Image: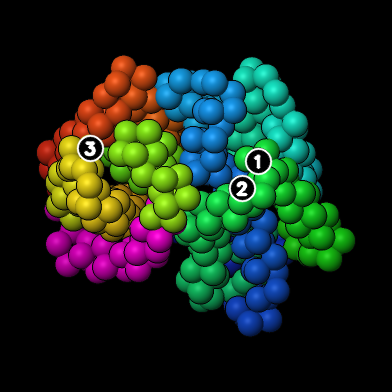
Amino acid sequence: MQKRVIQEIMRSLQPQSGKTEPGNPGENGSFVSQLGLILFLTAIFFFNFLGRIVLAPLMPSIENDLGIAHAQAGSLFLLVSLGYFISLLCSGFLSSRINHRMTIIASAVSVGMVLLGISFSSSLWTIRLGLFFLGMSAGIYLPSGIATLTSLISVRHWGKTIATHELAPNLSFVVAPLLSEAIMIWFSWRVVIFFLGCCSILIGMAFAFLGRGGEFSGEAPNFGSLKALFGEPAFWIMTLLFSFGICGTLGIYTMLPLYLVTAQGIERSWANTLVAFSRISGVFMAFIAGWASDRMGPKLTMSGVFLITGLLTILLGTVSDAWIVVLVFLQPVMAACFFPPGFAALSSIGPPNARNIAVSLTIPAAFVFGGGAIPIGIGMMGDAGHFDLGIALAGGLILTGSFLALCLRSPRE
């Protein structure tokens, strides 16, 4: 889902004149010659993303171990999102003082260290603090990782580079439940987090000694165009739409294993297996959504996606027995279709020099709401004995995006 945001960051990093930026290869950096670096950064991004979402399949075990309620479980995802929000906005201040290479290493190693700390934490408050710092550690990677890729890869190879780098989040959604269940056959949920922490530290240290690129500083954020951007009604509409879009994907994903286990009575291992395989379709549906957006326009495509996703999410909270398995697979198929038309619409908002800022502000804010506040709301409904209603209400919220998308006006309109 982050494919378009990465493209926007890439465009914002592209030189505006004929001069070459530090480390910019011009037209000479081929995809094949830099494949090792691309895979290196993809591996770092994989553990970065996996560390943030692995709580979802572990949540039933964490609830039992710590004796916490569903709402408290949902609040853990909000803390990760808040840390990620702050870090992503401020990452330029760090990379402007140390170079992008050191920022990437710092992100990978600090993510690993925080995960190790969480694995040894026995207090809910120390876990909460650790998750906030997990989000902050993870958030500084993406801008510097993309800056490093674009400094070594020719513009004409950016498409393949993005597709390879995007394997990280897509595979994470599938791997997280399967890896969790494989380790928890013999060990507790803490060992899963400990294992990921070790992997993140090792890949960060490996990049420090074996990787290359990124030996130039970033730029601190320029807030000069914020006033014009905030004056655009379309910006606020898109922020809401992205919140609904992330609610339909990450927000539902984070609470789905817990919902299947506690409300639907499905065995934990079977629930995590269902969730893992249900996310495979998202890799392919993005291409179909992109084609639909080109044919019908982003506005109509988003409206249709929200309509179907909202209805499927409502059904996910109302059906049971064999139908629940069908809905677990159908809901993410449509939910993943929002992001191609969503980023296409977002990229047309505001003056050219503010478009990358629109992306940078919209995505973190949407993550806090759709990936943080929504799970808390679902958890609160679960504590009240209405977990299914919480899922259905989230579907109703997504459904409103179908009508809100029709209110969007592009600059050409």
Display coloring? rainbow
Percent position of residue 233, x then y: 25, 32
The kind of residue on which mark 3 rests is Gly
Callout 1: 10 Å neighbours few (<14), some, many (20+)?
some
**Which circle marks residue 292 in the picture?**
none
At a point 49% along the width and 35% down the height, the residue shown is 60
Q: Is mark 1 on a helix, strand or loop?
A: loop
Q: Which residue is denoted by mark 3 in the rendering?
A: 317
Is residue 210 visible in the rendered image? The answer is yes
Quick one: 300 or 108, which is closer to the camera? 108
x, y (%) of residue 27?
60, 78
Q: Residue furthest right?
A: 209
Residue at the spot 84% in from the left edge and 66% down from the top edge? 210
Contact, mark 3 vs mark 1 (Cβ under 8 Å): no
Estimate the x, y position of residue 372 in percent, counting from the top left. 44, 30
Q: Say few, some or many: other residues with alpha carbon within 10 Å of mark 2 (under 14 / 14 to 19 / 20 or more).
A: some
The residue depicted at 69 percent of the width and 65 percent of the height is 40
Residue 283 is covered by the magenta coloring: yes
Residue 243 locus on image (x, y percent): 34, 36
Q: Mark 1 points at which residue?
A: 188
Q: Is residue 195 left or right of residue 324?
A: right
Q: Quadrant of residue 45?
A: bottom right
Say whether disc 3 or disc 1 marks the residue closer to the N-terminus. Answer: 1
Asked if the stretch drawn in magenta spans residue 375, the answer is no
Element on which disc 3 rests: loop
Q: Nearer the viewer, mark 3 or mark 1?
A: 1
| Magenta residue span | 275-300
Quadrant of the snapshot with the N terminus: bottom left
